[in-house]
Amino acid sequence: MAAPRELQWLLGLVGSMLLLMCFYQWDVSQKKQGRIRQLQEDRKQLLRDVCAIDKGAFPKQKYTLGDLNRKDLGNLIVDDKNGVIYCYIPKVACTNWKRVMLFLKENMTYDEIISIPGPKIHTGKNLTLLKSYPPSKIKAKLKKYTKFMFVRDPFVRLISAYRDKFLHPNKYYQTYVQKVWSLYGNKRGRFYAKGKRKAVASKPQPTFYNFIQYLVDPRTERTQAYDPHWRQMYRLCHPCLIKYDFVGHQETLQEDAEQLFKMLQLEDDIKVPPSYENVTSSGSVEDWFRTVPLEDRRKLYKIYERDFRLFGYQRPAELLDE
């Protein structure tokens, strides 16, 4: 049995070690928070810099809030209770972020909100859009409320849109499937979809290359606006006109969501939306674009170049500089 003096020394040593461990964990946490805060500042500064450059390069673009009409504000969801505005971008975890906005508004548990099917979430019946307010209130809310958005690598987002809307189309997107197939599909009765040979039969299924042909075709933009699932992110959320307080990335969803909830002082009220494994890795992106000719890849990049530049995504040289 240890003597009292030795016991005191041992307890003191253990206490010191515990104190050092606590300090170390606190220090690591503080450094992590500092890194995430700095990342946010870098993202917002990049937006300011690119917007300033583009203002001179594209003088005909909309550059005041007064230039925006109600249709332009169709992707901004408002939570008056907490003073929050979220601009949703399809194929950037927007289903779960709409659930978060619904949770903030409705008197429901988080588990109840999460259990609501995606299609019902997207009807928007219980969500309030900014465009529903009169102009004076729209301006006031944009100035006062905390505004956030989440973005994603533009080409990865296109792959996700193709997989969702062309490989598994619902009744609405079946019209796109038929249109793209009629314009660009192989009409000899056979086609290839992601390396798998299938018969056309009664259900045409355009290839990823057909989808890219549709996007880069000048007629597409002239005759109709891009569907929101592949419309440029900056055209949905207008980051050069609306001063966002937080810009999250799909690639860092967990860290960004935690930081956002802390900023909103909601970290004790809501969980981080569940993430999923991103099956579209960098190598997979190259695989998807393997059947797309270099000329069309470059045309596609020009269409989405502002998204790459505004949100800090590197130009995919491996796809464009062959």
Image (spheres, grey):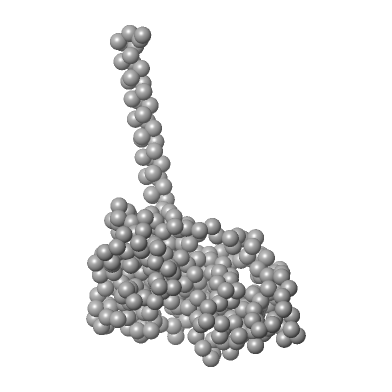
In the image, is 108 to the left or to the right of 230? Answer: left
Residue occupying the point 32% across, 73% down: 126
Residue occupying the point 32% across, 20% down: 12
- Residue 123 appears at what percent x and percent y? 39, 76
Residue occupying the point 28% across, 66% down: 106
- Residue 182 occupies quadrant: bottom right
Quarter holding the C terminus? bottom right
Residue occupying the point 32% across, 81% down: 131
- Residue 197 occupies quadrant: bottom right
Is residue 38 among what the camera can see? no
- Residue 218 appears at what percent x and percent y? 59, 87
- Residue 51 occupies quadrant: bottom left
Quarter holding the N terminus? top left
Which residue, as the protein is rendered here, is positioned at the far bottom?
223
Number of numbered markers: 0
- Residue 204 appears at what percent x and percent y? 65, 82
The one of 285 and 43 positioned closer to us in this rendering? 285
- Residue 257 appears at what percent x and percent y? 40, 57
In the image, is 195 to the left or to the right of 89? Answer: right
Is residue 131 among what the camera can see? yes
